[in-house]
Amino acid sequence: SGTGNVTVGARNITVEAKHNRSSSGLKAEAKAEPSGGGAIGFSGAFVTTEANADTTASIGGSGANITATGTVTVRGTADNDAKSEGKAITGGLVGVGAVILSATSAGSTTAKVGGSTTKLDATGAVTIEAVATARALSDGKAIAGGVGAGTGVDSTATVDPDVTAKIGSNADVSSDSSITVEASLDADVNADAEGVSAGALAAGVSIANAFM
């Protein structure tokens, strides 16, 4: 980024910030698979994953003067991908399995030009673009067997990002070609919960919540 009392002159100007583009395959991921047994057996998995990175590409600021004889591109791109997996397996005269997990994809992706008294003049196109991908997957499974068997699974996935492309207030932006200001989001959220109880007295509760 460039801010405050800056003079920039060039043919083409590109300011770009990137975080984990989707092609990289990088993500925040956590997994737990406990097991238990005995006359009274218990196993529990507790998993939390968060992908909340903030990514900002910016140019300008108070008193900045930017001139390009070609194009100006300001682009912020980010991929916040969170995945939680948990599986609990329990066997015994009395077997209890519990899984509680959450996956959250949030963070902000921003592309912006200037604030007060920023002046940007380009002969070519001016593009201000914020592109974000947000994915959250929460997958839980509990298996219990015994004369008395019980399972409980609580699985929550949340996608809640901020994606912003903007021209700052009181900024003066001009182009002899075109000015494009665009923000886009590709979001996917999925929560799965599965409980399997086997026995003379068997009970199970499975709760899955997906929020976007």
Image: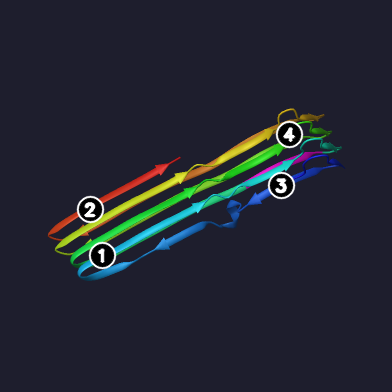
Within 10 Å of disc 3 (Cα), the crowding (few <14, some 14-19, many 20+) is: some
Residue 204 is labelled as 2
What residue did someone put label 1 on?
42
Kindly report the distance in space between the C-alpha atoms of the residues bearing marks 2 and 3: 50 Å
Residue in front for this viewpoint, 136 or 101: 101
What residue did someone put label 3 on?
16
* Cβ–Cβ under 8 Å for marks 2 and 3: no
Is residue 210 found inside the magenta-colored segment of the image?
Answer: no
Q: Residue at x 45, y 60 (%)?
A: 30
Kindly report the distance in space between the C-alpha atoms of the residues bearing marks 1 and 4: 58 Å
Kindly report the distance in space between the C-alpha atoms of the residues bearing marks 1 and 3: 51 Å
Q: Is residue 16 left or right of residue 158?
A: right
Magenta span of residues: 71-77
Q: Secondary structure at mark 1?
A: strand
Q: Residue at x 83, y 37 (%)?
A: 66
Could you tell me the amino acid type at mark 1?
Answer: Phe
Could you tell me the amino acid type at mark 2?
Answer: Gly
* Cβ–Cβ under 8 Å for marks 1 and 4: no
Disc on the earlier residue, 1 or 3: 3
Residue 115 is labelled as 4
Q: Secondary structure at mark 3?
A: strand
Q: Residue at x 74, y 31 (%)?
A: 179
